Image (cartoon, rainbow, N blue to C red):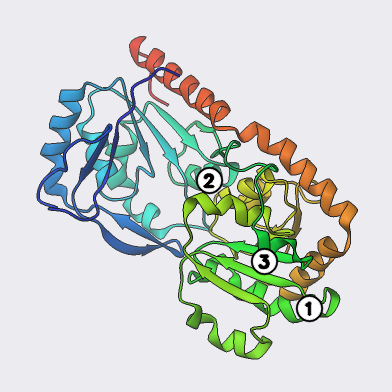
Amino acid sequence: MGHDVAVLAPRSGGDPSRMAPDRDGIHEIGRTITLPTNGSRAWLTLDLTRYGEIRRLLRRERFDIVHVHAPLTPALTWMALLGSDTVNVATFHAQRDGSAWYRALAPVFAPIVNRLDARIAVSEPASAFINRYFPADYMVIPNGVDLDRFSPEVEPFPWAADNAQRILFVGRHDEPRKGLDVLLRAMPAIRCRVPGVRLIVVGSGDERRHGATLDAIGRDGISFLGLIAPEDLPRYYASCDVFCAPSTGHESFGIVLLEAMATGKPIVASDIPGYASVLTHSREGLLSQPNDSAGFSDTISAVLTDGSMAAAIGEAGQTTAQSYRWSHIAAQVLDVYKGAWKARATGHLKT
């Protein structure tokens, strides 16, 4: 859309004592430390001594907007907001049942969140979560999907022409919240109803973590592919008959749902707030109770044995995915920027 964009992000590799040279507008700083959070892992830059470096960068570049993601996550976002002299916008991504961390440290976070001129949440559940601790006006703008990359025109792999029906799982399957064990325990019942069905697991994680479950249900027809080349991911969606997202919770959104919808594939997902905000039950997919393997086996089997229903769900998903096109999402973000800039220029109070 004609704007200049720079990215300041944690650095992996190289000399962490120095900011990496700018390359194509990407500024890498600090070193990353991996910490568990919200049932997942986060790669964080915790070195507060980099504040001077960041502030000098912000002053040199004279950005019109500083847009931070997950602003309460230490510590790079804190330093960017505290060092910014311009309009500040933040996107909040997290969703969970509660946060003792936010409640206890609200007075510490106040100087940071008070520097925000506008706030975005990626979903209604994410907005409701953050509003409990830092009440304000949050504009809900979802994540998007690349509809040129994920589409019904993507060519399946040659092996998908063998008439076997396939279930696809995409995610870090060593994280219990992703719910792969729930899907694995559903497989015996699915096999009984859909002979020859196969499960493809794409994503990082140690297959041995699921060893006891696999020994109990049998490994026949289950393939763990690990990390794959990004350019191949759309072809895995195109090569499956149903996409399954059995996460148990702590999901504020569902980018994998968008990817499956854009490819025209029916979805079976957990009925959790983050997923229910992306798809409507019986329209773009079917929602099943989390942690209920029997429920997932019934729902997945229904999709695999009812071609008309599967086709209708896939078509509805394609239609809905259009509203998540990145150009559409970007236009909404720009409207937030313009509103925040106007409010700052006219001296209105920050939201």
On residue 191, the disc is 1
- Label 3 and label 2: CA atoms lie apart by 19 Å
Residue type indicated by callout 2:
Ala
Residue topped by disc 3 = 290
Q: Earlier in the sequence, mark 1 or mark 2?
A: 2
Q: Earlier in the sequence, mark 3 or mark 1?
A: 1
Q: Earlier in the sequence, mark 3 or mark 2?
A: 2
Residue depicted at 71% across the width and 74% down the height:
293
Residue 331 coordinates in the image, percent (x, y):
52, 23
Residue topped by disc 2 = 126
**SS at badge 3:** loop
Left or right of 154 in this view: 57: left
Residue depicted at 89% across the width and 60% down the height:
306
Image quarter hosting the N terminus: top left
Residue depicted at 54% across the width and 67% down the height:
177
Give the crowd class for mark 1: few <14, some 14-19, many >=20 residues within 10 Å: some
Residue type indicated by callout 1:
Arg
Give the crowd class for mark 3: few <14, some 14-19, many >=20 residues within 10 Å: some
Residue depicted at 61% across the width and 53% down the height:
235
